[in-house]
Image: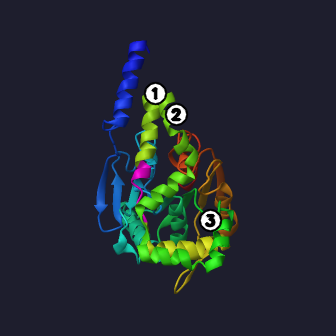
Amino acid sequence: MSITDTVTTAARNAWALSFGSGIEPVDPAPSTVLWDEPHRLLRRYDTEFQSAASDSAVLLVPPLAAPATCFDLRRDQSLARYLVETGRAPYLVDYGDISFADRRMGFEDWILDILPEAILRTSADRGGAPVDLIGWSVGGMFSLLTAAANTALPIRSITAVGAPLDYDKMLGIPQLRAVANLTGGKATTAFVRAAGGIPAPLTRIGYRLAAFERELQRPMFIANNITRTETLAKMESIDRFQSSMPGYPGRFYNQLWGRMMLANDIGNGKLELRDRTVELSQVRVPVLLIGGTADVITPKAAVEAGLRTLSGSPSVTYEVCPGSHLGILTGPDARETTWAHLDKFLAERE
């Protein structure tokens, strides 16, 4: 660019980030809402390739405390669009916002109600076709537990990206347990009950702390890339994602704290609920696990644990891809790594 163009671009980008509406407008992939009830909105992404490659459906399963836009951050960072491009029929279940009124919702609501109904409705929309689940983070754990608890569901395969499957391998968990031992874990439980869960602002702060180096380098990153509009647009999409994170329901977080962080149920291949035990060994479909080289939220060893616990699956494939927790799902290398592994895995099922 000429000096004039450089100065103009820099000024335009600086204004957009500081006072304007942003580097680029939000442009979600076209979709149709099929079902809209609290915490279970079902969306079908519009595609002209509805039956081109396969009659099956792909259901995208987000985690809690993260917006469902994780699968469609922007045009070039959209797994949903990629699935459409490759001739598949993607659907998305969206839990929406979590409030104090939802404080009694727990794991049971998702793995025994919300996700089974979303899977059945997705299958029905494709004429009874089987469904491939793709879950990110706790969404991957949800997908596996749902399949284990409901073996009759029309699930054909599960892909779990950055799924925490062994909390002994999670960063900081031993330290949390040491602190919890001083109070028997009651301090955290009491706080969560009083608050009705983990409020959205706290989940946003926690995510930013996990990526503290990125936050620290952000001003310098902007200064060094002020003329690189595409680079700033990618940064902006992550900022927008972080700022829209919802919270955790109280019962769910107390289960996560007690059953996962303290007791490590999932690392032992199960989840102890009030009236039943869900065993990961009951997953009877092929599974693809993807860990990230730079994932500090769910280290790759915590994902790899599924090779041990998913003993009932006919095949468990484990791949390691470059990137952070969000990066392995929708980062700059995802198309050539995570998405390529996913495409191969789904093609083998077809």
Decide if residue 318 is in sight here.
yes
Q: Report the mark closest to the observer, 3 or 2.
A: 2
Q: Are marks 3 and 2 in contact (CB under 8 Å)?
A: no
Compared to residue 342, the image places residue 235 above or below, namely above
Residue 62 position in % (x across, y down) = 46, 59
* Colour mapping used in the image: rainbow
Report which residue position mark 1 lands on.
Answer: 228
- Secondary structure, mark 3, is loop
Q: Are marks 1 and 2 in contact (CB under 8 Å)?
A: no
Three-letter code, disc 3: Leu
Sequence order check, earlier mark of 3 and 2:
3
Residue visible at 40% across and 47% down in the picture:
240
Three-letter code, disc 2: Met
- Cα–Cα span, label 3 and label 2: 36 Å
Sequence order check, earlier mark of 1 and 2:
2
Q: Which mark is residue 275?
A: none
Q: Which mark is residue 165?
A: 3
Residue visible at 52% across and 63% down in the picture:
138
Three-letter code, disc 1: Arg
Residue 23 position in % (x across, y down) = 37, 34
- Secondary structure, mark 1, is loop
Sequence order check, earlier mark of 3 and 1:
3
- How crowded is the residue under tag 1: few (<14 C-alpha within 10 Å), some, or many (20+)? some
- How crowded is the residue under tag 2: few (<14 C-alpha within 10 Å), some, or many (20+)? few
